Image (tube, rainbow, N blue to C red):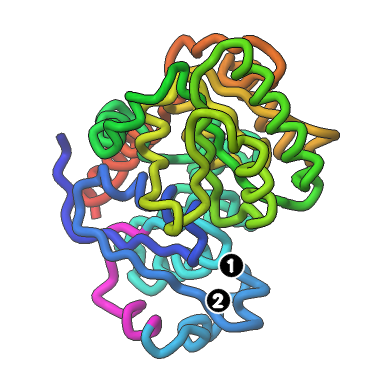
Amino acid sequence: MLKLRGDCWVITDQAAGNQRQALALAEPLGLPIHHMQLEPKPPWSWLAPRFTVGAQLALSSAQEQRFAPPWPAVAVGCGRQSALYTRMLRQLSNGRSYTVQILDPRIDPAHWDMVIAPRHDQLSGPNVVQPLGSLNPVDDDWLRDGREADPGLAELPRPLVGVLLGGPRRGITFDEGYIEQLASQLLLRQLAEGGSLLVLASRRTPRSLVERMRERLADASGLVWAGPDDGGNPYPGVLGWADRLVVTPDSVNMLSEACAVGCPVQTLVLGNLPEKLARFHRALADAGYLYPLDTIAPAPARPLRETAAIAAMLRERIAIRQANP
């Protein structure tokens, strides 16, 4: 394996999905990682990553102290606000920092050494990598660790159906009516085949909707997890043990991680999806990864796992840069 020199800054905001993607890409590089959350004040936050003048002064004093030389060998950012600072690092380091931005930065990707934007973003360029889904850590080792962390899930009646709840977003139906339909279809299938329903809420899931789901599934085998009050987060264990996964349609990250498991994945869509998200759903369906909830879904020919290959490509490009400064 190519050995890289220096350290790696992972720059994100507070969004868990952005942090998860950036760390999933950075960790395989084998460099010391320094994760910093940089959140500039307005107007820089509104204009990121277009307006760079004075952007260091837009940080809190603690953040400004961290965003200071010596500059890193590699910087990996995810999200629009982090793109402001990964963009700046190329100039601040005189080109010595290899800069990587995950997700469409909404300006010319030539401002970075590499941009990783999912195919449905429709961003192109000589330095743009276009995975089908989002980056994530899910692989055989991650799933085995999840099973070992939650061995009790294997004692529940099978099949084990993991249900991943996201939350409302513009253009998507995600309300009490949606939860009612989702619960009804889950219970109807469970009545026919038995098994257990393992329902996991996310930070974006309205509490009232989680509690409604809990009420509807009160007599069903399984669990409903909404946060620390329900115990430790069983997410890795649920993915590790799941015979089937049902994912609400709103989250690219959750759908991508579900499709990385290797079991059948289904979703329930009410109405129309926003066009960019609809492109993602169509791409997953065309590749045999995603099926409607009211169908019998087969397992995919192989799991959707793209992160390791992208990390290997990135390592090679960084090594070439370091060998030819």
Q: Residue under label 2, please give it.
A: 52
Magenta run includes residue 73: yes
Distance between the Cα atoms at labels 1 and 2? 7 Å
How many neighbours does mark 2 have within 10 angstroms: few (below 14), some (14-19), or many (20 or more)? some
| Most foreground residue, 135 or 102 | 135
Magenta run includes residue 302: no
Image coordinates of residue 220 in percent, x first then y, are: 56, 29
Residue type of the residue flagged with mark 2? Thr
- CB contact under 8 Å: marks 1 and 2: yes
| Most foreground residue, 134 or 171 | 171
| Most foreground residue, 251 or 27 | 251
Q: Secondary structure at mark 1?
A: loop
Q: Is residue 92 above or below residue 221?
A: below
Q: Is residue 108 above or below residue 12?
A: above
Q: Is residue 99 left or right of residue 297?
A: left
Residue drawn at 66 percent across, 28 percent down: 267
Q: Residue under label 1, please give it.
A: 49
Quadrant position of the N terminus in the picture? top left
Image coordinates of residue 142 in percent, x first then y, are: 29, 35
